[in-house]
Structures are given as C-alpha cells and as structure tokens.
Image (cartoon, grey):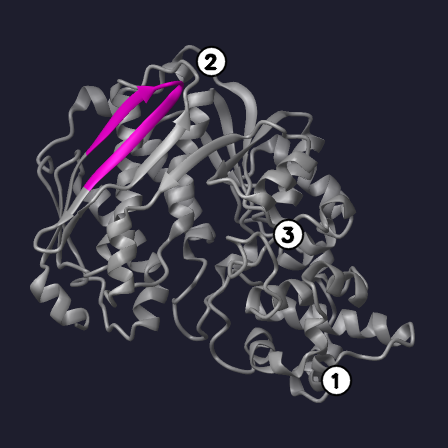
Amino acid sequence: MNYEELREKYSEFIYKSYSVDVTKDMINIKFYFEIPGLGKFEPAWSFGDNGLDVYTPLFSRIVFNLGMAELVSYWKIACPKKVTVKAGALTKEQIEWWKDLYFNGLGEFFYTNKINASYEDFMEIESDFLKGVNEEESEEVSERQKAGEYNETALIAVGGGKDSVVSMELTKKTGMKANTYIINPRGATINTSAAGGYEKPVVAKRTLDPLMLELNKQGFLNGHTPFSAIVSFSSIIAAHINGFRYVVLSNESSANESTVKGSSVNHQYSKSFRYEKAFVDYEKTYIKSGVHYFSFLRPLSEYQIAMQFARYPKYHKIFRSCNVGSKEDVWCGHCAKCLFVSVILSPFLKNSEIADIIGNNMLDNPQNIDLFRALIGEVDEKPFECVGSRDEINTALVVAMGNMESEGEKLPKLLEYYKTTELYREYKGKKNNYPKFYDKENLLPPSFEKIMKETVMGD
C-alpha cells in the first residue's frame, strides 16, 4: 500500500504511556505505542543508575519527551493522520514544536518515498491534557540545579567519527572535567573514547521493537528519521542522571545546507543550527533540567574539522564514519560517506594514508564517479549522508590537487576527471577562506568559545 492507502487504513497512532523502573543499578525506560489494527510497539532504553531519584515530575518530563522523539520512527511505518498523546501533557505551542520537528526531520523520508506531504495535513497531534499543564510541575526546576549539584563537567556525545574526536580534544583544552556519552557501544565509539582517555563512558542502550523491523521487511514505509533529536533528549537524561552541566555535540555549520538543491530537504536537519536552537529553547521552557546542550563544532566547517582531525594520528586507524559498515565496525569502501571522508581529508593527509584508512583508494576508482559528481554538485542531490557542503568539497579537492601536483604526484582518476570540469576552473580561481571561517550562529558557552577561537582561529 502507498502513503494515502496506509493513512486511510491505519488512521491513528497512540502514544499510550511509558514506564520507568530501577533494577540492578540500571534505569530502565519503556515506551508504549500503538497503531490500532496494525500492532503495538515497546521500544526501550537503559541508563546506568547513579543514585538519582527518578520518580519525580522533572524526570517524568524528560522521559515523556524522549518518547515524543522516539515515536516518529514508529509513526512512519503507516503515517497515520492522527497522533493521540495519552502519555503526558502538551500545550498548543509544544504540539506545533513537535510538528515542525517531525515535518522537517522527515523531509528526506517524504522525498525518497515520493510523498507529497504538507505541513498542514501530514499529521494532527492531540493531547488528552491539552487544556492545561499542571502549573506546579511546569514550574519545577531540577533539584540538582536548585542545590547547585551540577558539576562543571561536559558530557561529549561520541559516534566514533572524526567530529566527536575533535570535540574530545578541544574540550581537553578547556581544562574542564569531561566524559563521553555512547548509545549502543560498538568498536569505533569505544575505541575513540578510550583513545581520548575516557575508559568508562556514560552508556545508554536503545532497543528497537522487533515488530517495526518485521514490518519494514514486509514493505511498510521506511526511511530516514531525525535520529539526532533522539540523541538530544537522551543526552539530557544521561547528563541529568550523572549531574553533568554540559552536553557537547559535534554538529558543524556545514550541516545547515540542504541535501537537495533549491529545497528544504536536509538529511542533517536535526544536526542543523535551526534545530539546535529550537531544542535548547524547548528544553529550557518545558523540561528545565538545568543541563546546557550545545554543539562545540557549530562555528566550524567540515574542512576545518578535517584539518584538526588530521593532527591526531592516534585516531586515524580506529575512527569510523561509514554507516554501511557500522555494524561490522568497518569502512565499506564504496559508499558516499567513505568517499566524502577520502575527499575532505585529502588536503591534509597523503592519498596513500587515506587509502590505508579506508581500505582502498576511492579517488582512483572510476566506479565512484556518480557518487563523486553528487558530492561536488554536478547533480542537484547530494548523497543522503552526513557530508559537507558542496563549496567546501570543491575547495578541498582544489587544495589537494595543488598539493599533489606540487609534489609531482600523479592525480587519481576522479581528480583527473575533476580537472576537466567547470567547477575546477571556478574553484581554482577562488580564495580559500575556510581556515579562518567562523559561524557566529552558535550556542557555545564562553569557556568553550575561548578555546575554539584560540585553537582553531588562532586568536
């Protein structure tokens, strides 16, 4: 069935409730969703217990909102017209906030499934508690915050790629205490965290409901959802449990660029500054945990991040950015993300060093030409991956080619092709402004901004 047929047959999605239990030093959270006539879903999360009283209105608010972020992964199976929220209170303003996140965060899902959805009619959200949020609960702030018990400590979200490595290393320069936050640990997340000196990271386990996976196999609707929003809400829980004041993300300025030219479709929407600012405002208004969430790398481009990362060789063999090979903790060596990493590191590492990291010389393989053309902007769609802007990709290629030619090195086949393009001629004549690029749209606290400017900008 297509989008309209599914919505007609399965017209309602219900966020029924959630549960919080503490067992064997673990805080266990479960959400209860249902699409009547199709099935019930019970995704779960687990966090290490640190002696926090979890049976408080504040903790309930945090958990409830994590459920709101989680539900869209199950809603997209049939895209019911109506979402009924029975698990907690939502004001009209909150309903609009969630609709905005879902609609923009599902931009790629709608686009790749050829769904002509509009903001007005793709979803109606109803809350049993719409008439009024309990005033006492809404005004309550974190007990940790009131008692001054939040430590000046940073919790750094680590995904195993180069970006979180740079955040770890820059955070060290602040002199602040820190630890890492990992969801469903795997080789690269554990190894990069340990290489950064964090042997005992804060770990959360996320468990998907098997029925969703089965329905995906059966051909129900599937596609990209705003996972970084789930990271946002879950990281607030992890920081609150452990008494950490800061949550440090590693989303860069490049994430703001749309994936499809001339549209708002952005694979990285929930990594964009628009989302980051909206999330922080929402958290301070409706959750009030006292935790400050921000992206340390927001002022930077992917070009600058690659330049910083190249200076930390101890991570070069253990980091992983490939989504295709993530379960096996390998670089697949043939996807757009592997090719992008090869390109963005090319101004700063030798071609042979990059090939040693990825497992093959992707820039010398003509079979990668279609991915390459999508990355540089010769077609309207960038790959639906977390890749840099078209501008910095072209800049990186021109710089890398200049380095190779000055050393008498033969150009790889994709760079030979690039040299024949109008883009090469255009960017060959442009000044490279990325080494001193700084996006002022960011939420860095003063101590972090000071280090950012001193270390990256040379101020």
Left or right: 282, with 257 as reference point? left
Disc 2 secondary structure class: loop
Instruction: Give the residue displayed 79% in from the left and 67% down from the top.
Output: 351
Q: Which amino acid, mark 2?
A: Glu
Query: Mark 1 vs mark 3: which is more N-terminal?
Result: 1
Left or right: 280, with 430 as reference point? left
Query: Mark 2 vs mark 3: which is more N-terminal?
Result: 2
Local crowd size for mark 1, using a 10 Å CA cut-off: few (<14), some (14–19), many (≥20): some
Chief SS of the magenta region:
strand
Q: Position of residue 387 (x, y in %)?
A: 55, 63
> Does residue 312 belong to the magenta stretch?
no
Q: Which residue is mark 1?
A: 416
Q: Is residue 135 above or below residue 439?
A: above
Q: Which amino acid, mark 3?
A: Tyr
In the image, farthest residue toward the bottom: 420
The part of the chain drawn in magenta is 18-32
Left or right: 267, with 319 as reference point? left
Q: Which residue is mark 2?
A: 149
User: The C terminus lies in which quarter of the figure?
Assistant: top right
Instruction: Give the residue displayed 28% in from the left and 37% down from the top.
Output: 65
Q: Which residue is mark 3?
A: 438
Cα separation between marks 1 and 3: 32 Å
Q: Position of residue 140 (x, y in %)?
A: 28, 19
Q: Nearer the viewer, residue 114 or 289?
A: 114
